[in-house]
Amino acid sequence: MNGKFPQHFLWGGAVAANQVEGAYQADGKGLSTSDLQPQGIFGAITPRTAGDSGIKDVAIDFYHRYPEDIALFAEMGFKCLRTSIAWTRIFPQGDEETQNEAGLAFYDRLFDEMAKYGIQPLITLSHYEMPYGLVKHYGGWGDRRTIDFFERYARTVFERYKHKVKHWLTFNEINMSLHAPFTGVGLPQESDKSAIYQAIHHQLVASARAVKACHEIVPEGKIGNMLLGGILYPLSCKPEDLLETQRQNRDWLFFGDVQARGYYPAYMQRFFRENGIQVAITEEDRQTLRETIDFISFSYYMSGCVTADPAQYETARGNILDMVPNPHLASSEWGWQIDPIGLRYLLNVLYDRYQKPLFIVENGLGAKDRVEADGSIHDDYRINYLNDHLVQVAEAIDDGVEVMGYTSWGPIDLVSASKAEMSKRYGFIHVDRDDAGNGSLERRRKKSFYWYRDVIHSNGASLKDRR
Ligand code: BG6
């Protein structure tokens, strides 16, 4: 490993409001789409009735316990913490003309707490949730008016936090709307492709409007997009497999292409035509899209394989993307294939394609941890996973890729997105809570806590090339 992490590399961790905060009705917060999915992002949409309880209602109670958690992050030496603002804390129904002051005040307190330790916020405007009011009354992102509501929200938080937050992201894993439309764009799961791409188009326009607003209001700030970096390899060197791989990679790279280049890529015309997809795009929309992001951010957990033979797809499923297993890779307990070299490859693919700085804003291993009788947790599997991925980040830096930072997913145990489980743990910090919601919520340092502290402290020099 030759690559050196730059001096001001943003080391840290990433969480999301709906997976940590809890307090789902506190201080005037409205219901979000996430509040209606107690079983996770693929789960049924469940109307809320008084007295019922989903695991996310309390989550890890970050809303009340953030000072303790931020102090623990500071102890590891975090330079950066990625979290999201819950849109429904600021505009509870989504279409109000005035903001909810109590919601804004919460994030003031949170950012002030981070500032005490010199931890920079990296803030996602929308992470897998939107006001349910906008879904109910407007049909979510299917309606153009949602663009204006989102812009109002974005401008409100840029104005409010412009002195506290310099790094922003628009929509978490914007490409996942293709697979989980309710979570991504507030549309029914069974929506047809035209409806989904129309809603996605509105979201892309809204993202560009937020970029413009950020450039105006926070001129010294930076704003990026956020992609699910689901890089796919051909299962064989058969030309048909290669072509199919290119096609499927374009399914998600399309989002980055629009956000980084400012226009729809040529290949989408044929895709829309051949799939009978109609998307209404105005001239004004095209102008708006020209406002492009400053950097690319993405999540990376695994790679997958593609073949032109549809029969082979029945064998595996990742979190969101359909993939065929790679015979050369091992898998996590949740069947996600572990591929550190894939991260180096992906960093190079994205840098070659966009020539913009990159930020790895999610990466980590979901695993079951065992608490020993003395309270210790020996999560060497997590240390190995993260170590090996970071070694590959160093390699990519040596390849010449500009990497701004790395925020591992779930530095503290949180509710998983896909199935709303607590037992799928990512943290350096253990939280005493089980899938049924039992537990004291007590925080406990795992072995990986000390390992990550050393990595940050040495700016990556303590990483071990285990190949
Ligand atoms: C990403 C999301 O897809 O993966 C996170 O942005 C999510 O919200 C993470 O938690 C890990 O997925 P899961 O299902 O293990 O929580």
Image (spheres, helix red, strand yellow):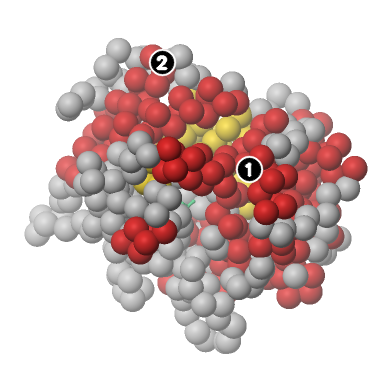
- Tag 2 and tag 1, C-beta contact below 8 Å: no
The amino acid type, in three-letter code, at marker 2 is Asp
Instruction: Give the residue displayed 30% in from the left and 12% down from the top.
Output: 2
- Secondary element under disc 2, as helix, strand or loop, is helix
In which quadrant will I find the N terminus?
top left
In which quadrant will I find the C terminus?
top left
Instruction: Give the residue displayed 75% in from the left and 26% down from the top.
Output: 219
**Residue beneath label 2, please?**
399
The quadrant where residue 421 appears:
bottom left
Task: Work out whether 230 lies above or below 95.
Answer: above
Q: Position of residue 113 (x, y in %)?
A: 53, 42
Q: Position of residue 358 (x, y in %)?
A: 53, 28
Q: Residue furthest bottom?
A: 50
Question: Would residue 422 be seen by someone viewing this image from the given angle?
Answer: yes
Residue 224's mark?
none
Residue in front for this viewpoint, 433 or 347: 347
Count of numbered tags: 2
Q: Residue furthest right?
A: 283
Q: Residue furthest left?
A: 373
Q: CA distance from mark 2 to mark 1?
A: 25 Å
Residue 412 relative to residue 293: left or right: left
Instruction: Give the residue displayed 71% in from the left and 70% down from the top.
Output: 135
Residue 255's mark?
1
Crowding at mark 1 (Cα within 10 Å: few <14, some 14-19, many 20+): many
The amino acid type, in three-letter code, at marker 1 is Phe
Q: Position of residue 304 (x, y in %)?
A: 37, 46
In which of the image's four quarters is ligand 1 placed? bottom left
